[in-house]
Amino acid sequence: VFGKYSEMSLENMKFINNTANSMGGAVYANGGSRNSYKNITFNGNKASSGGAIYVHGESQDTFEDVEFIGNEASGLGGAVLYTDADNIVFEATFKYNRANDGAALYIKSKTQNTIVNSQFINNTALLGGIVYVNQVVFIENSNFTQNDAEYVIHLDGVNTSGSHVHDSKFD
């Protein structure tokens, strides 16, 4: 799926074993997008960055009841890579995703991001974190279980001051 300056509402879908030569194995969105993902599975997708999803530009996206399973990026964002994002809200499950940094999520944003009621299970980052963010992030009611990385949450830069993790579990 490709969108530019889009407002996509994706619901009740499965993206399985898709491959992109560069970015966004299943979804690539460019430019000020507002996308909604609900009841979707991304399984086994691959790209150099953003194994399942790559979004560039001022996006305001929401994820509800979304599963990312076994997605892979040779670079950044095993499941999801955002650059220049505005405000992303995740309620998702991330299992068995792999990347150099941001095995589950790699978010380079301009404003805060929210991760709630999410599960991060058996993800692998070769060099960095399971979740990478460069701005304030609020993580609530989320579980991080049996992940393999240098950092579980990689907060990069002075703009991450004020980030909060509440009612979450790390095993």
Image (spheres, grey):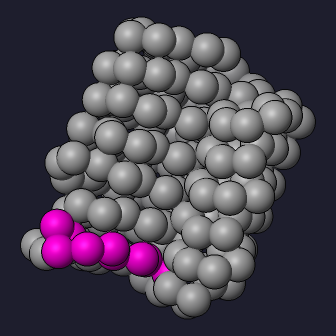
The residue drawn where x is 57% and y is 47% is 80
The residue drawn where x is 53% and y is 47% is 81
Residue 5 left/right relative to 27: left
- Viewer can see residue 129: yes
In what quadrant of the picture does the C terminus appear?
bottom right
| Front-lying residue, 88 or 165 | 88
The answer to if 9 sits in the magenta stretch is: no
Q: Is residue 68 above or below residue 95?
A: above
x and y percent of residue 148 in the render? 67, 84
- Quarter holding residue 115: bottom left
Residue at the extreme right: 17
In what quadrant of the picture does the N terminus appear?
top right
The residue drawn where x is 49% and y is 33% is 55
x and y percent of residue 129 in the render? 53, 76
x and y percent of residue 119 in the render? 54, 63
In magenta, the rendered stretch is 152-160
| Front-lying residue, 113 or 109 | 109
